[in-house]
Amino acid sequence: MENYQPAPNLLAHRVILVTGTADSLGAAVASACAAQGATVILSDKEAASLEPLYDRIAATGAPEPAILPLDLEAGDEPQYAAIAATIGREFGRLDGLAHCAAFAPFLSRINDYDASEWERVLRINLTAPFLLTQTCLPLLRQAPDAAIVFTADRVGRQGLAYWGAFAAAKFGIEGLMQTLAEETRDQGQLRVNSLDPGIVRTGLRARLYPGENPADLAAPESITSRYLYLLGPESRGVTGQAL
């Protein structure tokens, strides 16, 4: 998968929802999907933050994207249900869901963690992806070849000091991915995987490591082919994998 080269128009005629597209990783994944022919639904907290990416994608001649504001912290079940209903009404389908949004306010020892911040980080990084996935499942199951990709992190596979709630949430994402993959394995047309993109240049990384030189980190565009592989038809049969 590391050296995977997608075929032209790999995602043609597919509708792909990408979260966290106001930040660099989500924006790179959304742009890569659009370049491969997908109609991309751009999602983040503020609609205004998505307009520059919308314009960049539209200017390439790719299928016109859509903007879907979504507050991962404040959204409740009716709001997520309404989002899924809107996608179904406007597009009639959903072929892929890439969870790229991530939030970590600081690094802290467990015994110093404020309970309200703990809940906030879990809400954004674990509960919100669960709710969005759950409400979109009927649309994904209707697609002939659908994929869900959860963005993982090394601290959610091997705990590291000071990562607190973010690490706990990412461990939870792995469990959610594995459970859903098992529940849908016999259905064939839906695959569910997680992908750790490694240390790349993102807003979250810059916030937590302000003294780090961003130029020393890999650009998010360098790893988008891995998302394309998991979202595209060539990964049929690959499910339940922590990649």
Image: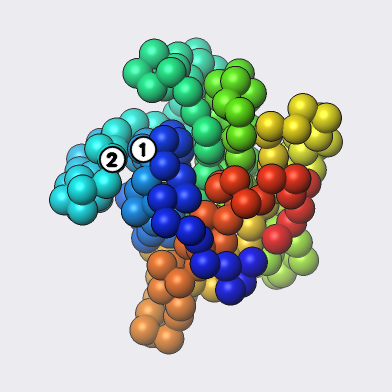
Q: Mark 1 points at which residue?
A: 39
- Left or right: where 8 falls relative to 129: left
Query: What amino acid type is highlighted by mark number 2?
Result: Pro
* Residue 219 percent coordinates (x, y): 41, 73
Q: Quadrant for the N terminus, please.
A: bottom right
Query: Which element carries disc 1, helix, strand or loop?
Result: strand
Q: Mark 2 points at which residue?
A: 63
Q: Which mark is first along the chain, 2 or 1?
A: 1
In which quarter of the view is residue 227 placed? bottom right
* Residue 178 percent coordinates (x, y): 79, 43
* Residue 212 percent coordinates (x, y): 43, 82
Question: At 71% across and 69% down in the image, what residue appears?
Answer: 160
Asked if residue 164 can be seen in this view, the reply is: no
Query: Decide: marks 1, 2 in contact (CB < 8 A)?
Result: yes
Asked if residue 182 can be seen in this view, the reply is: yes
- Left or right: where 233 falls relative to 223: right
Q: Residue 2 carries which label?
A: none
Viewer-proximal residue, 197 or 184?
184
Compared with 213, 175 (above or below) is: above
Question: At 75% across and 61% down in the image, what residue appears?
Answer: 157
Query: What amino acid type is highlighted by mark number 1?
Result: Thr
Query: Which element carries disc 2, helix, strand or loop?
Result: loop
